[in-house]
Image (tube, rainbow, N blue to C red):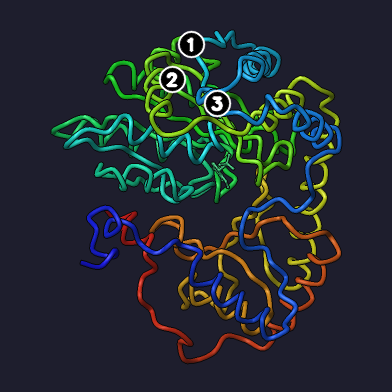
Amino acid sequence: MRSMDFHRIKLLPPYVFAEVNAMKAKARAAGQDIIDLGMGNPDTGTPRHIVDKLVEAAQNPRAHRYSASRGITGLRKAIAAYYGRRFGVDIDPETETCVTIGSKEGLATLASAMTGPGDSIVTPDPSYPIHAHGFLIVGAEVVAIRQLPGEDPSLPSGRDFMEGFKKTVETASRKPLAVILSYPSNPTAQIVGLDFYGEMVDFCRHHKIYILSDIAYSEIYFNDMPPPSVLQIPKAREIAIEFTSMSKTYSMPGWRIGFGTGNKDLVRALTKIKSWLDYGAFTPIQVAAAAALNGPQDCVAHIRQLYQGRRDVLVQSMAAAGWDIPSPPASMFAWAPLPKGFRHLTSLEFSKLLLTEAQLAVSPGAAFGASGEGFIRIALVENEQRIRQAARVVKKFLSAGAPEVKPVSAEPPPARKAANR
Ligand SMILES: Cc1ncc(COP(=O)(O)O)c(C=O)c1O
């Protein structure tokens, strides 16, 4: 029997970025200078005082032992203090938060802790791949509901998803176990207000459905309204857990540290399964993460400004190149409709063309779900000068026009198949 025949492996499509990544690697190996706005991988390095804390903590041999799988007390207290300061939410560090090895690990591990035979969950479509795949891997059915920003401008943000979700629940023979919410959204940058969370919490409490919120981009916003937390809704903690990440807020993607906070039963389930699976993140990383949360926050403002500057350069320079890209209100991504003249191509075909003809790497929208077709995601992970350079090559590329014949196969990318389930 080959490894690809294993039951769970067969549930997994190849990783959605794999095809474009393979082309990117080949182009680089051939000596091409690829401007890489594909993966959401922060490029700026972690602020100095956080790195210094890691180095200091790593000098202590006691810190080299196995750590605590649910997180060291100091970090859990720092998380509770963050929730108090930022959202006005009172969290018990003993029972209402659990440290994770990045929020991706937390989401996937909780999925395996929660899911039983016949369970289904609901995700927005498009959405960050682990939202659906964390559950698909453990055998849940995933119902993906279309959610695109501003499709009907007369509706408040998130309304279409809310209506689709309510209809799904009210007509289901068996209620979904959980719904995933994630704002600011990766990939679409969509944000919602507290009224959205309030209505969701009321509805989900009534139907006994858990809410799994992912606020990885909560600190990357560009207007005067910081994105709220679902836990600000007074009764949310009866049903909701929220995952937060250090990766984007403090530019710490490689450190692998995040946390899940909220409902005690969900935190207990996450803590219990993690106690079987791992010994926690390396203690010096946890010490440094606590220093990041407790320390000066001007580095966060700086990171926010950096993405805002890049966003403005991207939107302006691409518009001048002939490609209108809506300005994202938050996150580190722009969600761009395929340019006019290229809309007969799939998002994967267009992404491949952009890579081969303009040496620019982006992510195909369909990689995030069927409703992402017709869009690409641009990550703001190169500096302003490189983004301007990208706009110059795009201008040339657009003026050459689209190829008449489709350049690559129209096979739907794997995530689309998964998102249709
Ligand atoms: C919405 C969302 N959630 C979670 C993650 C993963 O974050 P972490 O590095 O904490 O695992 C990402 C990473 O891109 C993301 O976009």
Q: Tag 2: residue type? A: Val
Crowding near pointer 1: few (<14 within 10 Å), some, many (20+)?
some
Q: Rounded to the nearest whole Å, what is the CA distance between mark 2 and mark 1?
A: 7 Å
Which residue is the site of mark 3? 99
Asked if one can make out residue 294 in the rendered structure from this viewpoint, the answer is yes
Q: Which of the pair 323/93 is nearer the observer? A: 93
Q: Residue 290: percent from the left, percent from the top?
A: 71, 23
Q: Secondary structure at mark 1?
A: loop
Q: CA distance from mark 3 to mark 1?
A: 12 Å
Ligand 1 is in which quadrant of the figure? top right
Q: To which residue does mark 1 refer?
A: 95
Quarter where residue 22 is shown: bottom right
Mark 2 highlights which residue?
267
Give the CA separation, mark 3 to mark 2. 10 Å
Could you tell me residue 15's position as x and y percent? 44, 61
Farthest residue in the left direction?
A: 173
- Residue at figure coordinates x 50%, y 91% from the top left: 404
* The one of 32 and 327 positioned closer to us in this rendering: 32
Above or below for 159 versus 373: above
Q: Looking at the picture, which amino acid does disc 3 mark?
A: Val
Q: Amino acid at mark 1?
A: Thr
Label 3: which secondary element: strand
56 relative to 115 in the view: left or right: right
Q: Position of residue 243 (x, y in %)?
A: 52, 30
Q: Quadrant of the N terminus?
A: bottom left
